[in-house]
Amino acid sequence: MRLRLAFVSLLTLCAASFPARADDFFSFGEDDPDFLEVQGGSFDINRAHTAAFGLEYRSDYKLLSILKPMVGGMTTTRGAVYGYAGFAVDLHLGEHFVLTGSEAIGAYGRGNDANLGVAVPEFRSAIEAAYRFDDGSRLGVLFHHISNAGVSSRNPGAETLMLTYAYPVPKLLEQVLGKQD
């Protein structure tokens, strides 16, 4: 119930801050750079509530004008690891809000954490809502579900809720390597 209320509140806030014309409202971030995103939160939120940390790279390359390749990994404080690759779609809502949906396939090692049935394949479906700052970086909330989609008789799945910060890779490289002429 609290998650629904937070989601409705976020949508209401977004709707109140957008321009009246639809063509000014929606875009797929045609000129977005590639991003490196750090994540921190809770894995298996319905049962174990294990602390989790992730790192994800999203390419600026787009297939079919909207699908952005991505690759990432997550680890928990109980030793679980999950590596994945897939595609993300950014939907820009006005100038500062971005919704990102993504689908990925990966491999899971449970360590001392949740038993998801099999190590491979584990599918990941995610939704992220983020605020985009003027410098292009993003601060958001990510929710994802990991499941083996029934390839094993054991398929409990696991939900994860994380705070995210995504930084444009070109700006990161400029800061690390210095401005290149």
Image (spheres, rainbow, N blue to C red):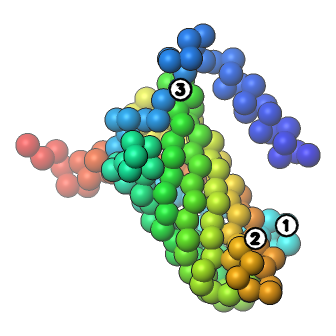
Vertical arrangement, residue 55 with respect to residue 83, above or below: above
CA gap between label 1 and label 3 equals 34 Å
| Residue designated by label 2 | 158
**Numbered tag placed on residue 46 in the rendering:** 1
Q: Residue at x 57, y 45 (%)?
A: 100
**Numbered tag placed on residue 26 in the rendering:** 3
Q: Residue at x 44, y 43 (%)?
A: 66
**Res 110 quadrant in image:** bottom right
Closest to the observer, 71 or 149: 149
Name the amino acid type tagged 3: Phe
Q: Earlier in the sequence, mark 1 or mark 3?
A: 3
| Label 1 SS | loop
Residue 113 seen by the camera: no
Is 72 on the left-hand or right-hand side of 111?
A: left
The residue mark sitting in front, 2 or 3, is 3
Q: Find residue 56 and report its horizontal and vertical position in percent.
A: 48, 61
Closest to the observer, 23 or 178: 23
Quarter the C terminus occupies: top left
Q: Earlier in the sequence, mark 2 or mark 3?
A: 3
